[in-house]
Amino acid sequence: MDDNGTLVPLQEEHSLPERNGRWSWRRLSLSARFGILAALIIFGATAILGEWLSARIADNQLRSRAESAALYMEGFLARHVEVTETGPRVSPARRQELDHLLANADLSRRIESLRVWRRDGEIVYSTDKSLIGRRFPSTNVDQAFSGNVVVHLEYGHDDEGERPRDTDEPLIEIYAPIYSPGTRDIIAVGEVYETAQDFIDKRNLVQRQTWLLVTGTTFSIFGALFVIVHRADKTIVEQRSRLNIQLAEARALAQQNEELRRVADKARLDASALNETFLNRLGSDLHDGPLQLLGALILRLGADSARETADGKSGGVATTSLTSSAIAHQVFTELRDLSTGLVMPEIAQLSLQSALQLAVDRHQFTSRTTVTVSYENLPHDVPEALKICLYRVVQEGLTNAFRHADGVDQQVVARADEWNITIVVSDSGPGVSVGTTRDRLPALGLVGINHRVQSFGGTVEMRKRRGKGTELIVNLPVNVGEY
């Protein structure tokens, strides 16, 4: 709420100004945060996935090319390799035939060179005639003799003994086992170098298509997710705005309720103060009015009785006058006690313990009885209305103890803790018919005490003591506001 009491909704996080011009992650909207995180995660994952797919596609293409070449060499070279007692060999006639076949225009464009290896690393045939009969150790040949097809993509020849080339064109080097016709016995290994430019062009095309597909799919997924999150963010912002308005309204209502509670508490305390003022005025009026007239009446009756005795009138008339005087004197005494009880002493400057002790002292002086007291942790400063209420509780409790128990074992215990103030007034007399505050209280004075205590949010309970006697228990909250 502003100073005029108008509800002002709270600002959203992403609409708040940046402090000191600094960028803040928490001030971004949900959709903006999602966009940044999703972009980092999705595009990072896409790069990894695209690279993996590209490598797998290239590897599979190369492997497929090698398998095709292996089948070609097995069908093409197997019939040209002869098995002798000294091992596989290619006869001069077969060499000429292979040279003639490799001179074919189609094969010459595809196959750059061809070799046939024995298990001991000797070359029994090569398009480079200087290599025939020479031996070179090769792990690739060993792998091929174990039944595997070995393939490499390289630039230029890397074999030992090969003449250096002027260009570094891409080549596919393939080692494939050559089986004896009709069996699975490996008799030699064929090595072929194929030109790889056409393969590389096709591989790059497939990789580009793969990257385009992956990138397009990624952007489609990211866009769809962004739209969904943006809508959800908009809904969340709207709901948050409504919640902020409702929260502001709830806070305003709570503040209004608190103000109303304060007003009600002040009205309750003011009513209690007005009640005490009324009682004080009533006590003063009784003292200044009826008590003065009764005093005069008592003096008049006393004078008449003395005169009649002096004139020697009959004893019956004198007895009647004395009886009337005694009755009038009794009425006077009761009205005086009543007015004294109604008039509230000045306790505004006293502490709570001193005020309660004053009520005890006045009762002891009036009733000529003894009261045992105990005070524990009583607060020093309490509202005057609450102090008057507790004073009246002790006053009424002791009055009932004197009236119904003849003042036997009168006790007042007052203690306080963090939340409540408890007053217990007890005696050891014969007791009265009592119950909790849910029942009808036994005396009009206790009904008044009950109303006083309830106006402060407290409780009153009157019950029989264990063994013998009665006790009045009053509990009042400590946090009664001061006004």
Image (cartoon, rainbow, N blue to C red):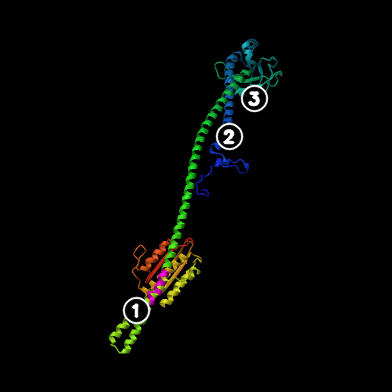
Q: Earlier in the sequence, mark 2 or mark 3?
A: 2
Q: Position of residue 428 (x, y in %)?
A: 38, 73
Q: Residues within 10 Å of mark 3 (few under 14, many from 20)?
A: few
Q: Residues within 10 Å of mark 1 (few under 14, many from 20)?
A: some
Image quadrant of residue 187?
top right
Q: Which residue is mark 3?
A: 139
Q: Earlier in the sequence, mark 1 or mark 2?
A: 2
Name which residue lies at 59% across and 30% down.
47
Q: Secondary structure at mark 2?
A: helix
The chief SS type of the magenta part is helix
- The part of the chain drawn in magenta is 279-292
* Label ID, residue 328: 1
Q: Position of residue 171 (x, y in %)?
A: 64, 19
Q: Earlier in the sequence, mark 1 or mark 3?
A: 3
284 or 11: nearer the viewer: 284
Image quadrant of residue 294?
bottom left
Q: Amino acid at mark 1?
A: Ala
* Label ID, residue 135: none
Q: Which residue is mark 2?
A: 40
292 or 12: nearer the viewer: 292
Question: CA separation, marks 1 and 3?
Answer: 141 Å
Mark 1–mark 2 contact, CB under 8 Å?
Answer: no
Q: Residues within 10 Å of mark 2 (few under 14, many from 20)?
A: few
Residue 31 as seen in the image, left or right of residue 369: right
190 or 388: nearer the viewer: 388
Can you say whether 423 is above or below 155 in the image? below
Asked if residue 281 is among those painted magenta in the image, a careful observer would answer yes
Question: CA separation, marks 1 and 2?
Answer: 105 Å
- Foreground mark, 2 or 3, reads 2
Q: Amino acid at mark 3?
A: Thr
Q: Amino acid at mark 2?
A: Leu
